[in-house]
Image: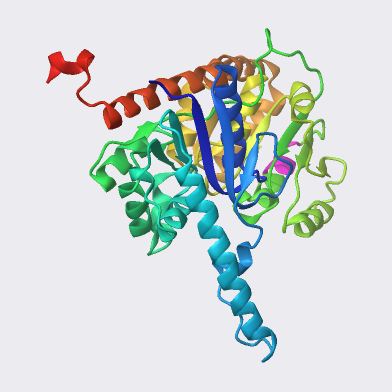
Amino acid sequence: MTIQKVYFIALRIPEFSGGSTAVETLSQGFANIGIDVEHVSLYPGTRQAVIPTTTFSKHETLLRYPIKTTSSKISLPLNFIKKKTAKSKFRKKVNHFANNIEKNSALIFTTNTPVIEFLENGIDPSKLPAVSILQHHSEFKVLYRNKSLPEVFRRAQRHTDAFTCLTYEDAKDFSSFFSNDSKYFINPSRFSRPNSLPKRDKKVISIFSRLSGEKRLDLMIKLFTESNTNNEWELHLYGDGQEKERILGIIKTLNAEDQVKLYPFTENVEDILERTSLSLNTSSTEGLPMTIIEASTFGVPTIAFNISPGMRLLEGLGACTLVPNNDELAFKNLLSNLLADDNLLTELQERAFQASTHFSKTQIAEEWLSWMNSLQQQKFHPFSTEDSSKI
């Protein structure tokens, strides 16, 4: 018996995030090799689903957060009744799903939260007649940003059959943390690799990003304008978020309207990357950035700060070039050299294009499937005939 169906179980999916994009892309990779895929979203996602998706409840705020006691005397008891009813319906949905899982399935929990939600509703994923896997889409050190997270992770890991993360460095740390083996898989690219490196004559740097503080886009704009001394290049930012007005203000203050363009979020990423020469990443935190992986598919190299194992893995493959974290001078010097030296830029573009051979969604899905089949064998047939010689 081998895995025939994969369920990705998420708090919310799909969303405008790298983790959500990685899950959707891996799902497409599974579909390419004949595996049935379904997404299970505990609460509604924030954009249109491209994979068949089941949503358990539309009442995330009601279910996950306390009722405000400042409500009126009439509405307060009604809200408690609504919450109780919503909890009952949610529990029934979780149990119905769990009771209809087939043995030839794999359950991939995209974060620890859905595992905890299952446990709170009477379902232990490790006891289900399917392989259960806990994913982590960021670096190991995020465990220590909140005092309660380490124990939450341990609890979720104890009630699943296996754990995966993004890099070898992270897998070593998690293996020590859990006192159990951890597996790592790199994220795949959404896009098919062209047969040859696209030719481009436009001097354009393209960035696809949430406009939020951890992306440090203010720093990116500053370093770009200081490096673009001949005003020959343009920086194009695609995205939306809470920092939008501040970023527009920075562009205006620097009198950089001709150099820096801010565009809305776009789905037209492929066409833009085919016309892009370079990308930048100034984030303060990253796991294994999909933006760098997808840029490399079209031979677009990225300059970034050395902030995580994922960044170091991508640099080792040739997808990006790193400078020490927070070393603004090193970043600016490298960027200035690339903007002025076509030969150096072409060299990095060729390296990035070669690196993209590692990000095939079909190839990565095949690696996942092989590993999941071995997990299934260990869980349900640990003493099968073919393994009897090893006992």
- Position of residue 298 relative to residue 323, above or below, is above
- Position of residue 24 relative to residue 4, above or below, is below
Extent of the magenta region: 223-228
Choose top left, top right, bottom left or bottom right for residue 241: bottom right
Q: Quadrant of the N terminus?
A: top left
- Asked if residue 322 lies left or right of residue 343, the reply is left
- Position of residue 154 relative to residue 304, above or below, is below
Q: Which residue lies furthest to the right in this view?
A: 258
Choose top left, top right, bottom left or bottom right for residue 63: bottom right
Whether the magenta-drawn stretch holds residue 76 is answered as no
Whether residue 360 is visible here, answered yes or no, is no
The colour scheme is rainbow
Q: Position of residue 362 (x, y in %)?
A: 55, 18
Q: Where is residue 236 in the image (x, y as percent from the top left)?
A: 78, 38
Q: Residue furthest top?
A: 195
- Position of residue 290 relative to residue 389, above or below, is below
